[in-house]
Amino acid sequence: MTTIKDVAREAGTSIATVSYVINGKVGEVSEATRQQVMAAIARTGYRPNITARNLQSSQTKLMGYAWHDIRHGQMNPILDQFTYLLAQSAEAAGYHLLTFTHNDDNWEAVYHELIRTRRVDGFVISNTKQDDPRIAYLMRDGFPFVSFGQANPDWDFPYVDTDGAHGVYVAVNTLIGLGHKRIAMVGWPEGSLSGDARLRGYRRAMQEAALPVPSVYVQRGEQLEQTGRDALRLWRALPPADQPTAVVAVTDLIAIGVITEAKAVGIRVGHDLAVIGHDDVPLAQYLDPALTTIRQPLDAISRAVVAMLHPLIAGEPLAYRRDLVVPQLILRQSHG
Amino acid sequence: MTTIKDVAREAGTSIATVSYVINGKVGEVSEATRQQVMAAIARTGYRPNITARNLQSSQTKLMGYAWHDIRHGQMNPILDQFTYLLAQSAEAAGYHLLTFTHNDDNWEAVYHELIRTRRVDGFVISNTKQDDPRIAYLMRDGFPFVSFGQANPDWDFPYVDTDGAHGVYVAVNTLIGLGHKRIAMVGWPEGSLSGDARLRGYRRAMQEAALPVPSVYVQRGEQLEQTGRDALRLWRALPPADQPTAVVAVTDLIAIGVITEAKAVGIRVGHDLAVIGHDDVPLAQYLDPALTTIRQPLDAISRAVVAMLHPLIAGEPLAYRRDLVVPQLILRQSHG
DNA sequence: CTGTTAGCGCTTTCAC
DNA sequence: GTGAAAGCGCTAACAG
């Protein structure tokens, strides 16, 4: 491997001078020697050893990101995309992504080790839950991190999140604009920050339009297709005049459940029943009918996360610690 | 941050001694001083700075892994799982995974930079294609890497792969054992290494059972649901006595296409038609009927990949350079 | 058995 | 403008 020494020898200068030109210390080195050094670098194909640089500057240029636990069949295609985009954003900012794993039992030990051995400069957290202990831990430790998703309204930590209430609000208003009056929603069980926000958007839109929301119109369940099926089945048991003509689901998977059940009983989705999902999973556009859904701007989110973590690592003050990103309604066929 | 110096001072020894006990140089240090040092370490919560270690040993303890390009809607849930499992395997071997991105145009520059700056110790390649240029590049460069998937039968490089022929062979034999005689297959376009292997398994099983394979029984198409639908539609146009009673698809997505089309025309999958997919995507078990499929043992593969890359990085000789892993037939309902 | 010391490859004062 | 030299935190000869 060629080192800075080789280049110095090749260029007939000292290693300091080579370092100067590499790091663009303008005015610090004459144009003549700069050329010498550049030529030597080109000739040798030299690239500075990043580990040496890191030791010297006591940083790693690495952002740590824990994989969401994949084992429970709890696949989350959104997070897969996010990870990819995050890696891209990190690279654009001169970092790389160190992806690591942990489980419910050892997460603290894993984070602790990563911090104490100075493996990474900071963390990105996702898949947060209410009172997320990882966030509590990192706040306590004072180690740089930014979260995609909230944890507790009373905690002050840097995060980026989708404005879930707004997304659903827009979706419901779109439905209302189409003439729907009996609009229902399937959400997650109470206590989920993002789930509750989405529900809030629904209620606000309905309220502003003075549309009634009988309690049966708000169904809740786990993140399963079955949840959507169950909800529709239940609504089908209502008198025809009370049955919802449109449904918003808290996620695409649940929307798929609604659609599957509808098709099974002969309801034409997009005609007799409007369905809107949330997240725009990779499959959504290929479904029949193509799923209208609320898309989280994952690229913008990943960029925002990196844009906050970067100064945080550098010890610079943050312009803002909370960033709410507006989602986008992707109109396809199922809202028909 | 506490360093080895702090611990030495705290323990009243030299930093060398501290280093010895950290690295378990047995017999090199008396039990008494070992205790001193251990106590000092415990007291200070000291953990060795990994960057310093890396510089000293000129390694990074990082394995580089490029994300498959996610943009073309070419989602590949298998690779998402693989990445997770790979990170786990790497960690079990004392490494971490550095996930990076590149596109079709800049991939060489990206790999080059990672290598020249000594960012990682080696690479894991996946999503390989015929004559994969990344593999050609890495072979030429002599940089340590292991591939999940093949590239060219004539190239000698370390890889791990699923024995796709064997998997389909077993699946078809299972179908034959169930009494099926008219078994068809949907594959990928010619020229795909793994696609062709799977097709080979099909042909071998059919041949051994002396079952005819009219050319119409082998359909090919892109990795789309539509491919499966088209295939079934085409077979439905055959005289009833010629229509296949069982179908094996080269992937679950294509199998889903077959099933969707079958349901649309009133064929009861699992009764009138047996369908077997390939890969066991996360959704497979939730489909209706639950999809029987051939699962690649991704955990074993990821472990095998790391088990090869590790000695490769250390410059140790490899016991073997090719590892074919046997897939597993997951019996659910769709095979009837 | 333990400590001194020479690097690993780079950046950055501080002289000249 | 350029170079000598002191580290960054750690490991590993090499003495003692």
Image (cartoon, coloured by chain):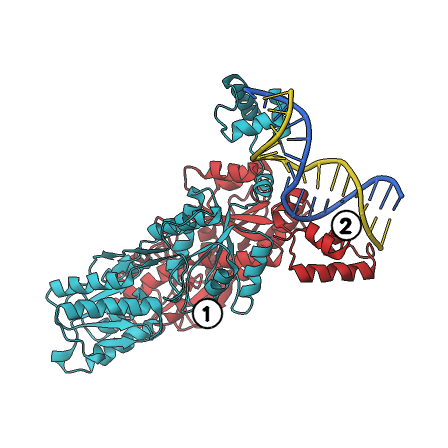
Chain colours: A red, B cyan, C blue, D yellow
* Residue occupying image coordinates x 64% and y 60%: A45
Q: Is residue A108 above or below residue B279?
A: above
Residue B276 left/right relative to A231: left
* Residue occupying image coordinates x 52% and y 24%: B28
Q: Is residue B327 above or below residue A132?
A: below
Q: Is residue A26 above or below residue A260?
A: above
User: Which quarter of the rendered picture does the C terminus of chain A lie within?
Assistant: bottom left
Q: Which label sits on residue A26?
A: none
Q: What residue is pinned by disc 1? A: B72
Asked which secondary structure carries label 1, the reply is: loop
Image quarter of residue B265: bottom left
Whether labels 1 and 2 belong to a single chain: the reply is: no
Residue B113 percent coordinates (x, y):
59, 58
- The subunit carrying tag 1 is B
* Residue occupying image coordinates x 77% and y 50%: A14
Q: Is residue B267 above or below residue B281?
A: below
- The subunit carrying tag 2 is A
Residue B317 left/right relative to A156: left
Q: Nearer the viewer, mark 1 or mark 2?
A: 2
Q: CA distance from mark 1 to mark 2?
A: 49 Å
Asked which secondary structure carries label 2, the reply is: loop
Instruction: Please say if the residues under marks 1 and 2 sit with CB atoms less than 8 Å apart.
Output: no
Q: Which label sits on residue A14?
A: 2
